[in-house]
Image: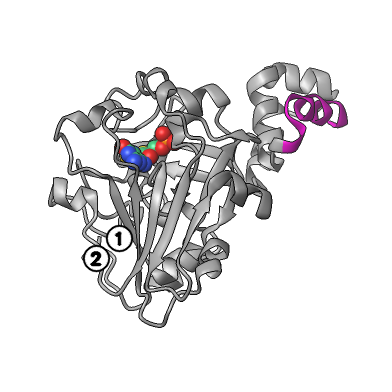
């Protein structure tokens, strides 16, 4: 066993979690090799069942190529495999984010400067797109709450509005009115302050690739992926719920967009999903598996109506 764990760990020491050791061992060595190399004399099925029982909550990470080669970024193209190449023109330095609205000290933050002030931390999170696919991504990021503390929200701040850069000279897709530009998203203040909510600035310890929303994008792991708005230039605290992009595109989208396998959403049923890299579908989990951490935010709210 020790040999195998070392082998798996050698693949990417800092980036794997307990279960990924177990899973990558399966993936890279295969079941037979696993028992041969481990010198186990157990019946494979028994040993397997035992391992499954104490399976930790963490999951195998998606690869760099998966995460950076299959992207939704409508400012470039609706073709997920074309985005990576098209986005090479983004040029995300220098880049500033204005944080204003219902705050005591509005600020314009230079992202490169901010990265020196706050050291981003690795945050592994599931991303579940309404199209029915998901990934597990090792982001580097900064808690949104830490950033918002800089500007001191007033007691009137009940929502946060996020806006992507508007620049048709760089975002070719914005030359056509396929969507209401600029892409806009929103959270309640409680959602924005939740410790799981963060601004991503990297993946696998490298700067955020353009196609993933360079240089800074929101990540809200328990909501459908479209809430995790890319290439943000404005964060505004407001009294009223902002009118966001997707509910304007179709009535099948709502403001909350919490992952919910019971409620059809967007294109239809959301009960199952395909993890990129896997063949068999998985059951989608309520709040994308983060219910124990976020369900309290929605106490008293009918999740099947407030979608
Ligand atoms: N500005 C902007 N942000 C966006 C999108 C977009 O088209 N434009 N697509 C969203 C959707 S639908 C998903 S699933 C995720 C995909 O993020 P990824 O490409 O980093 O996996 O980004 C979200 N953020
Ligand atoms: Mo998505």
Label 1: which secondary element: loop
Residue at the image position 59 percent from the left and 34 percent from the top: 207
* Residue that carries the numbered disc 1 in the rendered image: 256
Residue at the image position 77 percent from the left and 22 percent from the top: 35
Which residue occupies the foreground of this view, 145 or 279?
145
Disc 2, ligand 2: is the CB inside 8 Å?
no
Q: Is residue 13 left or right of residue 178?
A: right
Residue at the image position 83 percent from the left and 28 percent from the top: 6
Q: Position of residue 181 (x, y in %)?
A: 22, 43
Q: Position of residue 123 (x, y in %)?
A: 61, 48
> In this picture, which residue range is highlighted in magenta?
1-14
For the C terminus, the image quarter is bottom left
* Residue that carries the numbered disc 2 in the rendered image: 306
**Viewer can see residue 122:** no
Asked if the residues shown at circle 1 and circle 2 are in contact, with their CB atoms under 8 angstroms apart, the answer is yes
Residue 206, picture quadrant: top right
Q: Position of residue 110 (x, y in %)?
A: 53, 49
Q: Is residue 128 left or right of residue 79?
A: right
Sort mark 1 into few (<14), some (14-19) or many (20+) by Cα contacts within 10 Å.
Answer: some
In this rendering, which labeled residue sits more in front, label 1 or label 2?
1
Q: CA distance from mark 1 to mark 2?
A: 7 Å
Which residue occupies the foreground of this view, 46 or 181?
181
Q: Is residue 150 left or right of residue 130?
A: right
For the N terminus, the image quarter is top right
Q: Is residue 93 left or right of residue 272?
A: right
Compare marks 1 and 2 and give the one earlier in the sequence.
Answer: 1
Asked if the stretch drawn in magenta spans residue 4, the answer is yes
Q: Position of residue 33 (x, y in %)?
A: 74, 16
Label 2: which secondary element: loop
Does 109 sit above or below residue 107? Answer: above
């Amino acid at each position: 066993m020790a040999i195998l764990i070392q082998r798996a760990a050698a693949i990417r020491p800092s980036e794997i979690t307990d279960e990924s050791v177990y899973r990558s061992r399966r993936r890279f060595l295969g079941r037979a090799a696993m028992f041969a190399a481990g010198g186990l004399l157990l019946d494979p099925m028994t040993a397997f069942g035992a391992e499954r029982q104490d399976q930790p909550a963490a999951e195998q990470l998606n690869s760099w190529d998966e995460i950076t080669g299959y992207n939704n970024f409508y400012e470039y193209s609706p073709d997920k495999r074309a985005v990576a190449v098209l986005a090479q023109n983004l040029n995300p330095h220098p880049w500033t984010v204005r944080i204003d609205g219902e705050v005591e000290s509005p600020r314009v933050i230079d992202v490169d400067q901010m990265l020196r002030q706050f050291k981003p931390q690795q945050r592994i999170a599931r991303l579940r797109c309404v199209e029915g696919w998901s990934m597990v991504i090792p982001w580097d990021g900064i808690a949104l709450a830490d950033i918002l503390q800089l500007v001191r929200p007033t007691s009137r701040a009940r929502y946060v509005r996020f806006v992507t850069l508007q620049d048709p000279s760089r975002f070719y897709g914005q030359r056509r009115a396929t969507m209401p530009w600029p892409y806009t998203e929103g959270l309640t203040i409680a959602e924005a302050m939740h410790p799981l909510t963060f601004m991503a600035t990297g993946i696998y310890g490298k700067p955020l690739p353009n196609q993933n929303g360079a240089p800074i994008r929101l990540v809200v792991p328990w909501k459908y992926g479209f809430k995790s708005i890319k290439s943000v230039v404005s964060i505004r605290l407001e009294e009223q719920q902002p009118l966001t992009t997707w509910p304007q595109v179709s009535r099948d989208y709502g403001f909350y967009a919490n992952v919910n396998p019971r409620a059809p959403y967007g294109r239809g049923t959301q009960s199952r999903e395909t993890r990129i890299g896997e063949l068999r579908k998985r059951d989608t989990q309520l709040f994308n598996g983060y219910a124990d951490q976020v369900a309290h935010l929605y106490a008293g709210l009918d999740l099947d109506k407030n979608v």
